[in-house]
Image: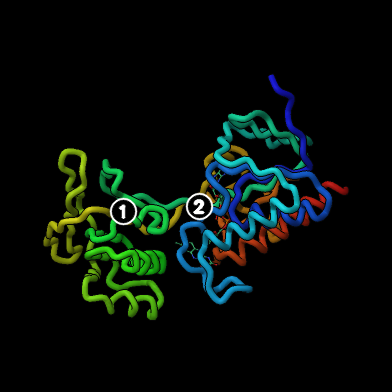
Amino acid sequence: MDAAKQFDTVIIGGGIAGMTAAVYLARANHSCVVLESNITGGLCNSTYTVENFPSYTDINGMELMQKVRDQVDALGVPVEEVCEITSLELNGDTKRVHTDEGVYEAPTIILATGRKPLPLEVPTPSDQVHHCAICDGAPYKGKRVLVVGGGNSAFDESLYLMQLGVAHLTLVEVMPRFFAAEKTQDQLMAYKNVRTMKETRVHDLVVEHNVLTGAVLENTQTGARETIPVDGVFVFLGQLPNSRLFAHSITLDKQGYVLADANMQTNIPGVFSAGDINAKTFRQLTTAAADGTIASLMADRFLRR
Ligand SMILES: Cc1cc2nc3c(=O)[nH]c(=O)nc-3n(C[C@H](O)[C@H](O)[C@H](O)COP(=O)(O)OP(=O)(O)OC[C@H]3O[C@@H](n4cnc5c(N)ncnc54)[C@H](O)[C@@H]3O)c2cc1C
C-alpha cells in the first residue's frame, strides 16, 4: 500500500471557499492539497452571469472559477479532481483523509464542501431532469422545458434557456409569489413564449418508454390539474449541505450546516470550515471567499503554534 501523502493542510472542496484558502496557504509557504469530488469551481460553475463579484461588471460563472483555478495552479497547489473521499479521521493531532486515490495526512483540515440542489419531490426516472441550464441546456434548443422554482436561480437560468432558443418555457412556483429580483422577472416575462404560474406544483412527470414527454401540474388552491407537454425539466428548489461525510464528528445545525465560530473553527481543534457549508445568513461568492481567507489564516496560526 502507498504511504500516506503529507501536507500542512488538506482542503476538502474546490469551490471558491476551498480555492481561496489554497491561495492564502500557498502564499504563506504551507503545503496544501485541494480534494474535489467533481471538477473545481463548485456552484458558481452553474451560474450564467455573475454581476456582483468585485473586479468584473459581469462574467460567466465558469470563466470566473477558471481564473481562480489558474491562480491556484500558478502557486503550485496540487488539486485532485473526481476524488472520492471514503472516510475521515479528524480527531488526534494528525488528521487522515481516506480517498480512492490513497490517504492524505495533515495537522489541519479545511472543510469547504458547499451545497447541492434539492431534488424534485416526484419520481424522476428520466435523464431529462436537470439542475443546471448552463451544463445541460444546449440540447433543448427548439424544445419545450419546464422550470420548477420561483427564486433568482430559476429566473436567471430560465433567461439562459431562452437565450439558447428553447421553443417554450413554463415556470411554476408553489408559493403565491415569485422571489426573484423584479428586474429578472420582468426580463423573463417579456418573452411571448414564456408562461409563469404561481401556486402550482408538479404533481407527476409523464414518462413513456423511458422518455419524458410531459408534466402534470396542480393548482395548490383549487386542486385543478393540467398536463403539459415537456421535453426537459430544470429544478431550482434550493440547496442541501454536503456534510454527510463528517456528520458523525463535526457539530452541525438541524439542517446539516457546520456550526463554526466567527474564525471558522469547528468543534475539533485544527479542523476549520468555510463557505456555504457553514450555518450563516448570507451565501455568496464574496462571503465564501472571505470564509476561505479566515479559515486559511487560522490554519496558518494553528500550524505555527
Ligand atoms: C444558480 C446559482 C447562482 C448563483 N449566483 C451567484 C452570484 O451571482 N453571485 C454570488 O456571489 N453568488 C452566487 N451564488 C452563490 C455562490 O455560488 C455560492 O455562495 C458559492 O459557490 C459558495 O462557494 P463554496 O466554495 O462554499 O461552495 P461550492 O461552490 O458549492 O463548492 C463546494 C465544492 O465542494 C465539492 N464537494 C462537495 N462534497 C465533497 C466531498 N465529499 N469531497 C470533495 N469535494 C466535495 C463540490 O463538488 C464543490 O465543487 C449562486 C448560486 C447558485 C446555485
Identify the residue at horizontal 20%, vertical 56% (top origin).
230
In percent of width and height, residue 266 lies at: 68, 49
Answer whether residue 92 is visible to the viewer in this image. no
The quadrant the N terminus occupies is: top right
Query: Looking at the image, is mark 2 or mark 1 nearer the viewer?
Result: 1
Q: Position of residue 146 (x, y in %)?
A: 25, 59
Q: Disc 2 versus disc 1: distance between alpha carbons?
A: 26 Å
Asked if residue 107 shows in the view, the reply is: yes
Who's the residue at 15% across and 42% down the image? 208
Q: Is mark 1 within 8 Å of ligand 1?
A: no
Front position in the image: 237 or 289: 289
The residue tagged 1 is 139
Mark 2: C-beta under 8 Å from nearest atom of ligand 1: yes
**Mark 1: amino acid:** Pro
The furthest residue to the top: 1
Front position in the image: 20 or 162: 162
Taking depth in this image into account, of 96 and 129 the one nearest to the observer is 129
Q: Position of residue 211 (x, y in %)?
A: 20, 43
Mark 1 burial class by Cα count in 10 Å: few <14, some 14-19, many 20+: few
Disc 2 is placed on an element classified as: strand
Residue visible at 28% across and 60% down? 141
Residue at image mark 2:
115
Residue count near mark 2 (Cα–Cα under 10 Å), binned few <14, some 14–19, many ≥20? some
**Horizontal relation, residue 162 to residue 221: left or right:** right
Residue at the spot x=65%, y=51% of the render?
Answer: 273
Q: Earlier in the sequence, mark 2 or mark 1?
A: 2
The amino acid sitting under disc 2 is: Arg
Which structural element holds mark 1? helix
Q: Position of residue 36 (x, y in %)?
A: 59, 44
